[in-house]
Image (cartoon, rainbow, N blue to C red):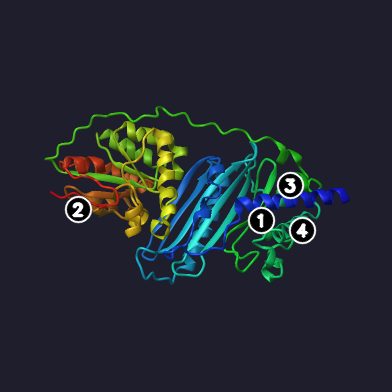
Amino acid sequence: MKRLTFTLIIALLILTTANASEYEKPPHIPDSRGNPNYSYLEKFNTKNKEVGTVESIIEYGDNSVIGVHYPILGKEKIDATTKTFIDKKILEFKNQVVNYKTPNNSIKAELNIDNETLLLNDKILSIKFNTFINMPFSTHTENGTFTLVYDLETQAQVKLKDFMNGDYLKMISQLAVKSFESNTLYSNHAVFDSFIAGTAPRDENFENFILEKDKIIFFFQSYQISPDATDTALMEIPYIDLQEFLNTQALLKQPVPSIPKKNGVTENQLDVGRKVDPKKPMVALTFDDGPNSKTTIPILDTLKANDAVATFYVIGNRISANKAILIRMINEGNEIGNHTYNHKQLTILTPIQMKDQINKTQAAIKAAIGITSKTMRPTYGSYNDDVKKYMDMPLILWSMDTRDWQSKNPKAVIKIVLDKVKDGDIILMHDIYPSTAEAVKDIVPKLKERGFQLVTVSELYEARGKALQAGNIYNKVRR
């Protein structure tokens, strides 16, 4: 036992040193413009192994905005549990901001949840939710990392008690205390009541974990271990250090299978050779927040059946799972625009973070179809001087908001478009709602019956002899 204890301490010291170089960062402070720093939200993106498809919930309010992305696996029980978790987080946020009134429309309260999925083997899936809540002008933001672990065969959620026995919570608690006491960021916090309570051997303190091939990673939420710890803290424990508490080696030691890449039809854009008559009326239909296989494909079907095209402003983190949809968009003459990587509100980001949102999406688009976007659309239509200054593309807004995200009613969307449409309009819709896909079935042929050409944003401006320039705002073309 003395030898095992010595091994544990040495392993822990090595682990703590490794974590210090990779995860330590200065205390959370605003940048020179008073905006929060969000760079840590992208910490694990390079390790992401995508499983299933991504579902998004995007909501626009007068005082708050929501951008939530979560995985759908096509397994009923798992998807239901995940959705319940997401609904709870959204409800908690809405209750938190129910009385909040923004003094500045360009800076709203924000809930952003992104996800990562990790396969341990063909049986165990870990989902990590990076959660961020921003209340403008408050002293601190709220950051959290929450997890769900599933047995893919039984569709049951996996808890520590399912693969550990004995007094495992006491051992994990001891390792957590030693780890944080050895970490310069937290070494002075061991005397705080929050530290003692947050590392105590209780289930709720260690319920957020993911299972990797050779270790467990535990996540501790904002303020769990310190009144000053506004970011998520983590601790890694190799399985070998917990071997006397593990009751199923098979669960943890099977090798991680490689995840096959989707086969693309082509990597290059096809020249469709569309002809646009600049003398005839035209409008540009635009769709945000996709792609989504359930709703984007029906919209593409409608466009193709009516010899029409549109512009799709895509979210970067949805691209790799929907590569074939992007290839089809381009092959059928549509345009793809950049709508950030995970629907962050650009007006509260630093210049580096803004560019990261755009550049990561450009890279994802290029990996899927071999080209990059010519235009971008700022999330929530929100921009300021910094957004215009640091964006290297034209910023495309809209002249008609169908508010499809609000009504989710095909008839309401159809009425707005057909009652108000004018030559040169850029029309905003979202290809993540079945109601929008249904509305498009009626809107597209009726616009064509009225003599409108349905064109891409770039075609609209080119046909009217208007040059699009980086950093400028565009929402319509009038003759």
Q: Which residue is mark 3?
A: 163
Q: Residues within 10 Å of mark 3 (few under 14, many from 20)?
A: some
Badge number at residue 324? none
Total numbered circles: 4
- Check contact, mark 3 vs mark 4: CB within 8 A: no
Res. 293 in view: no
| Mark before the other along the chain sequence, 2 or 4 | 4
Under mark 2, the amino acid is Asp
Residue 237: x and y, percent? 71, 49
Q: Residues within 10 Å of mark 2 (few under 14, many from 20)?
A: few
Closest to the observer, 22 or 398: 22
- Check contact, mark 2 vs mark 1: CB within 8 A: no
Q: Which residue is mark 2?
A: 419
| Mark before the other along the chain sequence, 2 or 3 | 3
| Image vertical order of residue 236 relative to residue 367, above or below | below
What is the secondary structure assignment of the residue under circle 3? loop
Left or right of 41 on screen, residue 367: left
| Mark before the other along the chain sequence, 2 or 1 | 1
Q: Nearer the viewer, mark 1 or mark 4?
A: 4
Closest to the observer, 356 or 121: 356
Under mark 3, the amino acid is Phe
Residue at 24%, 52% in the rendered image: 475
Q: Which residue is mark 4?
A: 174
Mark 3 to mark 1: distance in Å?
13 Å
Closest to the observer, 308 or 321: 321
Q: Residues within 10 Å of mark 4 (few under 14, many from 20)?
A: some
- Check contact, mark 2 vs mark 3: CB within 8 A: no
